[in-house]
């Protein structure tokens, strides 16, 4: 695949000309876009997609048992998260919303990540070691920060890009438009990655925007917007690779930022506190399940003799062992409630000191066991 194909064919497309490499059955439909990736790396991508799906299942199970906090499922979105991250360099920074666990998996998921979902901020801190910003709960508020970070990288002459993940619902937030406008004006090496999973909690795409696509929103800010099949890991790989090539090239005659709209579907609930059956029907879900990114990628790899039953069994065994170790290690951590007061401010305020003293009084009077009892 030549640079001309990457830059001018992919990023010059109409915003509704969706990039695809594989169809739902894993057949190559655009051979000119098929990336030249070594078999070992392709198997690694597959392993990470399988790991992300299994991680999802285990964490949801733990949450139902009361061993984990509220969690946002990624099932169905492994293709976009893994494919896009594999197209990056290690020095590139990732900023994400809260559902893109696959991007963290592709960055060798630290075991401490589980701690965050158990209520410990240590899980967020561990992400800095793999160039991932802490996850963001407030919708879209991380986008301006990602642009600021990528601007700093540009000013420091770093040959790196920043990828910022968000959902389709975030495009209705002011932060999205402010970040896009700033990125275009300052020409920052930012890749905006919109994970369009069709639903912003219970709001469908057609009630989110009157635009024909989310990708076309880039036109208003002067830079490229491209739509990709988000359930095709090879398509998201080549599109992100093209966007990154442009982002780190200071000599290009086009603006560095790119908006990628990855069209996909959230198989599960918005979070474990949501009931999707209230606002969508199962028939719709089943149509999208036929495009499962893991199934189609497995079919592609089998067809090229890169994967077989024996290798899949080995991968599954390794995933189970790794997850078991991670969960055991995370659940062995004993939290100290006093830590919640340590990092709120550089210097504690009088009110914070009052709260800390009150907690100590409660613990001294009642004991931790009584305070932790559920009525």
Image (cartoon, grey):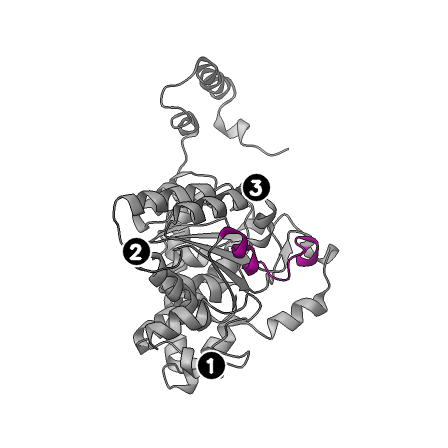
Per the model, the C-alpha gap separating discs 3 and 2 is 28 Å
Q: Percent x, y for residue 51?
A: 43, 64
Image quarter hosting the N terminus: bottom left
**Would you place residue 274 above or below residue 232 in this image?**
above
Query: Which residue is at 29% across, 57% downward?
Result: 90
The residue identified by callout 1 is 30
Residue 166 lies in the magenta-colored region: no
Q: Splitting the image into 4 quarters, where does residue 254 fall? A: bottom left
The local secondary structure at tag 3 comes to helix
* Residue mark closest to the camera, 2 vs 1: 2
Q: Percent x, y for residue 352?
A: 46, 18
* Res. 280 in view: yes
Query: Which residue is at 49% across, 83% downward?
Result: 29
Q: What stretch is highlighted in magenta?
A: 204-221
The residue identified by callout 2 is 250
**Would you place residue 195 above or below residue 343 in this image?**
below
Per the model, the C-alpha gap separating discs 1 and 3 is 37 Å
Asked whether 69 or 364 is in front, the reply is 69
Residue 220 lies in the magenta-colored region: yes
Q: Splitting the image into 4 quarters, where does residue 276 fall? A: bottom right
The residue identified by callout 3 is 174
The local secondary structure at tag 2 comes to loop
Per the model, the C-alpha gap separating discs 2 and 1 is 29 Å
* Label pair 3/2, CB-CB below 8 angstroms: no
């Amino acid at each position: 695949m030549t640079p001309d194909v990457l830059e001018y064919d992919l990023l010059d497309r109409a915003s509704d000309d969706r990039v695809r490499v594989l169809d739902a059955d894993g057949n190559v439909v655009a051979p000119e876009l098929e990336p030249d990736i070594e078999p070992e790396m392709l198997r690694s991508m597959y392993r990470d997609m399988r790991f992300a799906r299994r991680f999802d299942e285990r964490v949801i199970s733990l949450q139902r048992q009361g061993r984990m906090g509220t969690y946002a499922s990624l099932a169905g979105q492994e293709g976009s998260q893994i494919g896009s991250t594999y197209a990056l360099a290690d020095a590139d920074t990732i900023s994400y919303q809260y559902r893109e666990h696959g991007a963290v998996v592709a960055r060798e998921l630290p075991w401490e990540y589980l701690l965050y979902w158990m209520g410990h901020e240590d899980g967020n801190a561990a992400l800095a070691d793999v160039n991932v910003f802490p996850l963001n709960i407030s919708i879209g508020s991380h986008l301006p920060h990602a642009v600021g970070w990528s601007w700093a990288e540009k000013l420091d002459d770093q040959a790196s890009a920043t990828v910022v993940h968000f959902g389709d619902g975030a495009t209705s937030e002011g932060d999205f438009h402010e970040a896009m406008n700033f990125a275009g004006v300052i020409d920052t090496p930012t890749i905006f990655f919109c994970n369009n999973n069709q639903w912003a909690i219970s709001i469908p795409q057609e009630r989110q925007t009157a635009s024909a696509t989310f990708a076309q929103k880039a036109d208003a800010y002067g830079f490229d917007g491209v739509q990709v099949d988000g359930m095709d890991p090879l398509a998201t790989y080549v599109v992100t690779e093209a966007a990154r090539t442009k982002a780190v090239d200071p000599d290009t005659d086009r603006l560095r930022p790119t908006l990628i709209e990855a069209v996909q579907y959230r198989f599960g609930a918005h979070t474990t506190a949501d009931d999707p059956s209230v606002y969508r029907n199962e028939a719709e879900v089943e149509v999208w399940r036929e495009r499962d990114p893991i199934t189609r990628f497995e079919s592609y790899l089998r067809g090229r003799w890169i994967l077989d039953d024996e290798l899949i069994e080995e991968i599954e065994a390794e995933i189970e062992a790794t997850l078991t170790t991670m969960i055991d290690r995370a659940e062995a951590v004993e939290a100290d409630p006093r830590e919640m007061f340590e990092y709120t401010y550089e210097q504690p305020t009088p009110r914070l000191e009052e709260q800390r003293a009150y907690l100590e009084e409660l613990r001294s009077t009642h004991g931790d066991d009584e305070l932790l009892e559920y009525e």
